[in-house]
Amino acid sequence: MNNHSFSNIIATRLNIDESRVANTLRLLDEGCTIPFIARYRKERTGGLDEVQIAAISDWNERLKEIQKRKETVVKTINEQGRMTAELQLKIDQCWDATELEDLYLPYKPKRRTRAQVAREQGLEPLAQILLLQREQNPHQVATRFIQNEVASAEAALSGAQDIIAEMVSEDQISRQQLRNTFQRTATISSKVVKARKDDDEAQKYSDYFDFSEPLRRCSGNRLLAMLRGENEGVLKVSVSVDDEDAIARLHRHYVKGHGECSRLVAEAVSDGYKRLLEPSISNETLSAGKEKADEEAIGVFAENLRQLLLAAPLGQCRVMGIDPGFRTGCKVVCLDAQGNLLFHDAIFPHPPQRYRMQATVTVQRLIGQYAVEAIAIGNGTASRETLEFVKEALSEVTPAPKVFTVSEDGASVYSASKLAREEFPHEDVTVRGAVSIGRRLMDPLAELVKIDPKSIGVGQYQHDVDQTKLRHSLDQTVEHCVNLVGVNVNTASQQLLTYVSGLGPTLAKNIVDYRRENGAFKSRTALKKVPRLGPAAFEQCAGFLRIPDAKNPLDGSAVHPERYDIVEQMAKDQGCTVEELIKDKGRQKAINLNRYVGGEVGMPTLTDIMKELEKPGRDPREQIEEFEFDPNVKEVDDLTVGMELPGIVTNITKFGAFVDIGVHQDGLVHVSQMADRYVSDPSQVVHLHQHVRVRVIEVDLRRNRISLSMRTAKK
């Protein structure tokens, strides 16, 4: 089956018109990237967005994997000489991985089981006789099978029962029946391992020391928390159903009377359930729950990462970056408007040194010497104290630079990386970290792409979920954000260019090398001179690479070079140049778009072109805002229940949002405390780095937890 034969299956699963799915699959086969398809091929996909195109791509890969698995299954069964026309048809029509494994299970090579031993002893005919449940004296029938290793009728019947037990456990109908029972009625339970009950480290799992609830009601974050507790040796987790009811259902299917044969079959069915079937489906159910929880956690992480990467940039300006600290001092760097390091120093305004006057003089001198326009202070240790010191130092500076607190999650990871060593080979990790903090203020996206997303600190359970799926999702998220914003090809780092549609590490390096040797690119067309950047790569990347102040103003916009001729024709029809058309809103409004519809160009593309002409190369990100914590609250001990405080949202999960209120420990606004109305998804109420007002409702010093509320206080 080729990829386009999958279009019907994918269309049904995603509820998207099949022709749109088929066209999307063709574009993917042609090597088009998801951002390129979503932005520049709307006519062919019917306007599908990146999320829908990614879902089509993911389903396509999943079906390819099932197809490969089918080939293995068919080959194995054929080699055994056990393939039938009916089984072949079932396999051909199956596109569910679980169902396929059920079909394969009876034929799957396995370790030597009790049933396999019994078959080797020639007892399968006896098992078939028992299943018919017609014989009045099965012991007498069993005597015919006494031979070699089968020493008695009882041994023969026991072997036959082993065969029946395995048949029951491998029967597709039995497995699906029990699977449905688990889906409807399973309970998940966790118990503390007695030896760990009083460990301080184990207390973070105290909510799950004796926990039980219906699995279908268990949220993904609770399931992942329990499984992490089990991995750490604190908890034992199990999934179970009512065994008596499940066995009774199987008996109704297999047991057909009340005679001795029926009794032996009933025993075999019960044994097959307890020993083989129930453990298998229980593990499968827990794995399925884990997979669902993984998808949920990965989705939350990806959305948080998207918000973080698209955080408001300050833009190109001269910045002072400060990585705060007590004993080791505060590392200060001065950066030019392009983020280049101009100077660095260390100041010691805090205990134990307390060289406050010298630090003040240094900061004031550097602000004047390097014309600093903004100051970025990391939000880690000594952040509040450094912020207060800087504002005190700025009281004598006119005009005073704006001051911002910047998340420093992952800065230490970047500073110790190979990339940072290559960029600053003669500086230590503290200088590199301070540079990263300063650059994050200027352009969070450009700086954060240099860091493994898992180290940025906006996920929950990111180390517990499927790492391959996590990496795939996060890479897609970074790619989406980079291409949504667009990249200045003359200032972008190699890491940022790597995520541009159609490039990748090799072409990104070639672009940077070419730029270093030949100077800034003057036009998009000049990109074709970059080694190995051929027509296909140019088509995919050109629209996302910006060249501000180029001779052709469209080179600084999101209009793709393949559509320049349309804009040029529009300008000609309006009796002006392209540059004049961009500046004249009146001429833009006078354009009749219907005149330019034709070929592969439809109204979606023309509408996008007009949006770009209105605001060429517009940055979709918001404007950055200054923020201040409550000056009277600096430590957890300063908190009292009922206190209302300003805060910044630092992380969002399915169960709530974490908020920094300036006490070195984020508080949690549970989803039930996010609004005066019912909230199903916290991301519908808040976004990362949002400035919020919260109320303290509980402080748990032992577990180091702060509970906050955004609901209206009751009077």
Image (tube, helix red, strand yellow):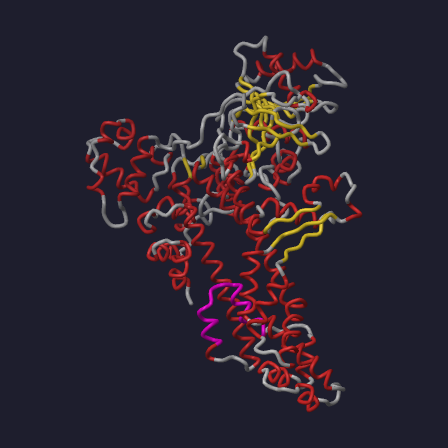
Residue 448 horizontal/vertical position (percent): 55, 36
Residue 4 horizontal/vertical position (percent): 38, 62
**Residue 357 within the segment the image draws in magenta:** no
Camera-side residue of 169 and 647: 169
Q: Residue furthest bottom?
A: 144
Q: Which residues are magenta?
A: 87-106
**Residue 94 within the segment the image draws in magenta:** yes
In the rendered image, the vertical position of residue 389 relative to residue 135, given as above or below: above
* Horizontal relation, residue 337 to residue 432: left or right: left
- Tell me which residue sits at (67%, 29%) in the image: 430
Q: Residue furthest top?
A: 396
* Horizontal relation, residue 219 to residue 15: left or right: right
Secondary structure of the magenta portion, mostly?
helix
Q: Quadrant of the C terminus?
A: top right
Camera-side residue of 256 and 131: 256
Camera-side residue of 290 and 262: 262
Q: Residue furthest right?
A: 195
- Tell me which residue sits at (73%, 25%) in the image: 328
Q: Residue furthest front?
A: 258
> Looking at the rendering, which quadrant does residue 400 occupy?
top right
* Horizontal relation, residue 454 to residue 22: left or right: right
In the rendered image, the vertical position of residue 571 relative to residue 337, given as above or below: below
Residue 481 horizontal/vertical position (percent): 47, 39
Total label count? 0
In the rendered image, the vertical position of residue 85 relative to residue 66, given as above or below: below
Q: Quadrant of the N terminus?
A: bottom left
Residue 518 horizontal/vertical position (percent): 47, 37
